[in-house]
Image (cartoon, rainbow, N blue to C red):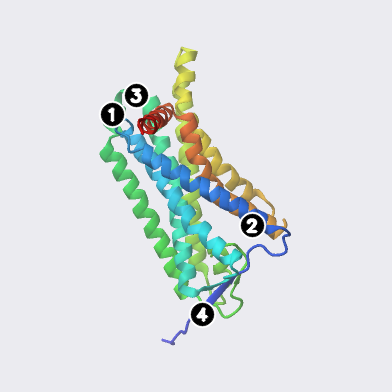
């Protein structure tokens, strides 16, 4: 058996946005988006601790806010460090650590949407069985299994890069250590990492989307059997916040995938970066504005704060 030596460079270079004028304004915009995301998701996590919201559904809402908060914090500050302070050289091991955390936490969002879709499916289509099928124990187990699956697959995917040799270019034409772009830098066979990458796309994007569409197809079928129009509208309103979150996450991703490969690379990068940071910012806003229980909880907290200030 021949000895195989893998070429592992000391560092990669993240080129990012090149030749775009006035990029400093875009970084200011990203900073504002990140701050709103941190504040909003932290607020939703605190609100979900209210005893009146300790239902299985809000276990998922809490996990969604947590994944958005940590995912944004894994990506955005590093982007600022790379481009604002010109730290474009990222060490070999640090690059793959960066990749692991970005994909792990950002991939959790569609699985949260899957859990919420299942919650709405049972609540509307099988209301008499809701408290039996959707329990705290079930929801905790479901979320834990999603975390275990995503972490395991991400670890395997990143570990496979140790079998690649990077004897050509070390320049990554992206704003982070992008899986596809890094594997394309390899000068040996990367078929295995390509297959795992395809599996990741199906697992993170297409499976959740198909499951959610199937759930709402069944919900639509169940609602079509309801005679009273008011009951249909009332049931559909309970899905409005979840459907908004689905649109916020999947529409930008679909638009990015639909963009032809001939489009300007910087335009594509900016679109991808917005797809990464916008959903974590908008998710808490959607839940606060469209979920009645959370609005009641927010009003209660604001009332308590006002009373405390007046008492001083």
Task: Give how far apart the Cα atoms at labels 3 and 4 are.
Answer: 58 Å
Residue 10 - label = 4
Residue projecting furthest to the front: 312
SS assignment at label 3: helix
Task: Give how far apart the Cα atoms at labels 4 and 1 are.
Answer: 55 Å
Specify which label sits upstream in the sequence, 4 or 2. Answer: 4
Task: Give how far apart the Cα atoms at labels 3 and 1 are.
Answer: 8 Å
Question: Mark 1 Cα within 10 Å, few/some/many (few <14, many 20+)?
Answer: few
Which residue position is annotated with label 3? 127
Which residue position is annotated with label 2? 269
- Residue at the (58%, 67%) spot, across then down: 85
State which quadrant residue 46 falls in.
Answer: top left
Contact? badges 4 and 2 (CB < 8 Å)? no
Task: Give how far apart the Cα atoms at labels 1 and 2 are.
Answer: 45 Å
- Residue at the (66%, 62%) spot, across then down: 17
Question: Mark 3 Cα within 10 Å, few/some/many (few <14, many 20+)?
Answer: few
Specify which label sits upstream in the sequence, 1 or 2. Answer: 1
Question: Between 35 and 279, which is closer to the camera in this rendering?
Answer: 35
Q: Position of residue 28 (x, y in %)?
A: 62, 53
Q: Is residue 39 above or below residue 102?
A: above
Q: Position of residue 251 (x, y in %)?
A: 59, 42
Specify which label sits upstream in the sequence, 3 or 4. Answer: 4
Which residue position is annotated with label 1? 131
């Amino acid at each position: 058996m021949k000895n195989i030596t893998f070429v592992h460079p000391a560092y990669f270079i993240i080129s990012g946005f090149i030749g775009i004028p006035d990029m400093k304004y875009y970084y200011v915009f990203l900073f504002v988006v990140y701050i709103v995301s941190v504040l909003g998701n932290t607020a939703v996590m605190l609100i979900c601790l209210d005893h009146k919201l300790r239902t299985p559904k809000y276990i998922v809402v809490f996990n969604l806010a947590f994944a958005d908060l940590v995912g944004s914090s894994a990506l955005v500050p590093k982007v600022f460090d790379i481009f604002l302070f010109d730290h474009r050289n990222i060490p070999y091991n640090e690059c793959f650590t960066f990749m692991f955390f970005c994909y792990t936490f950002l991939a959790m969002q569609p699985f949260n949407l899957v859990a919420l879709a299942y919650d709405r499916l049972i609540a509307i289509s099988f209301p008499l069985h809701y408290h039996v099928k959707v329990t705290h124990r079930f929801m905790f187990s479901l979320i834990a299994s999603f975390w275990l699956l995503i972490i395991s697959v991400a670890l395997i995917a990143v570990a496979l890069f140790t079998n690649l040799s990077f004897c050509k270019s070390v320049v990554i034409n992206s704003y982070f250590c992008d899986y596809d772009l890094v594997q394309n830098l390899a000068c040996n066979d990367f078929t295995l990492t390509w297959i795992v990458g395809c599996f990741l796309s199906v697992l993170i994007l297409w499976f959740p989307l198909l499951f959610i569409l199937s759930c709402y197809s069944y919900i639509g079928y169940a609602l079509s059997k309801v005679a009273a129009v008011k009951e249909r509208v009332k049931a559909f309103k309970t899905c409005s916040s979840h459907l908004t979150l689905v649109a916020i996450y999947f529409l930008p991703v679909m638009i990015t995938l639909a963009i032809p490969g001939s489009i300007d690379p910087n335009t594509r990068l900016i679109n991808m970066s917005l797809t990464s940071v916008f959903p974590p910012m908008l998710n808490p806003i959607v839940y606060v504005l469209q979920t009645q229980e959370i609005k009641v909880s927010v009003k209660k907290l604001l009332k308590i704060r006002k009373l405390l200030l007046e008492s001083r």
